[in-house]
Image (cartoon, grey):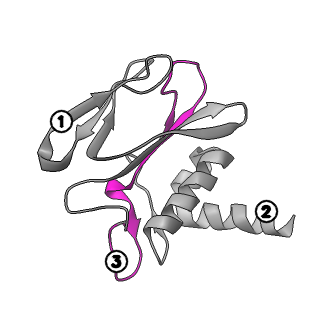
Amino acid sequence: MKALVAGLLAATILAGPAQAQSASKAARYLMAQEIKQGCAGGGKFTAADAVERDLDGDGRKDLLLSHDQLRCRGEQPISKRCGMQVCTVKIFLRRGDLLQPVADFLGGGVTVGPTNVPVISGYAHGGDPWAIRWNGRAFR
């Protein structure tokens, strides 16, 4: 139990105060995991790169994490999950009380559209644009 409380506290500290207050426990946990993978000394996602909202139209909040604007503390200011042009992007859909991973790809400049089943767009290596949307089974 102490380990669980310590883990949740660490997730809250790593995610930053604004994210900790607005994000679900599951989202804070996943953000902390991604920060740990991307930043040796801790860091913080911007609001644009840690999006918790309905992405598949089922009325429940899902999660999109893009390492594009993950800001690390210490010598390495950007995520280790970024290359020269693009970074890791992960999408998790809520299934029960958990957020389950459904997509893991590279992209930059990720945005989430305003509709109920939003278009998620960005750019790939070389600046080529891409856009995906939940089709009932997958993001395509």
Mark 2 or mark 3, earlier in chain: 2
Q: Which mark is residue 129?
A: 1
Label 1 amino acid? Pro
Q: Quadrant of residue 72?
A: bottom left
Q: What stretch of residues is rendered in magenta?
A: 52-78
Q: Toward the viewer: 44 or 3? A: 3
SS category of the residue bearing label 3:
loop
Residue 47 in the image: state x and y as whole percent: 42, 48
Residue contact at pointers 3 and 1, CB within 8 angstroms: no
State the residue at coordinates (37%, 66%). Answer: 79
Q: Is residue 52 above or below residue 84?
A: above
Label 3 amino acid? Gln
> For this view, does 118 lie left or right of residue 86?
right
Mark 2 or mark 1, earlier in chain: 2
Residue contact at pointers 2 and 3, CB within 8 angstroms: no
State the residue at coordinates (45%, 62%). Answer: 44
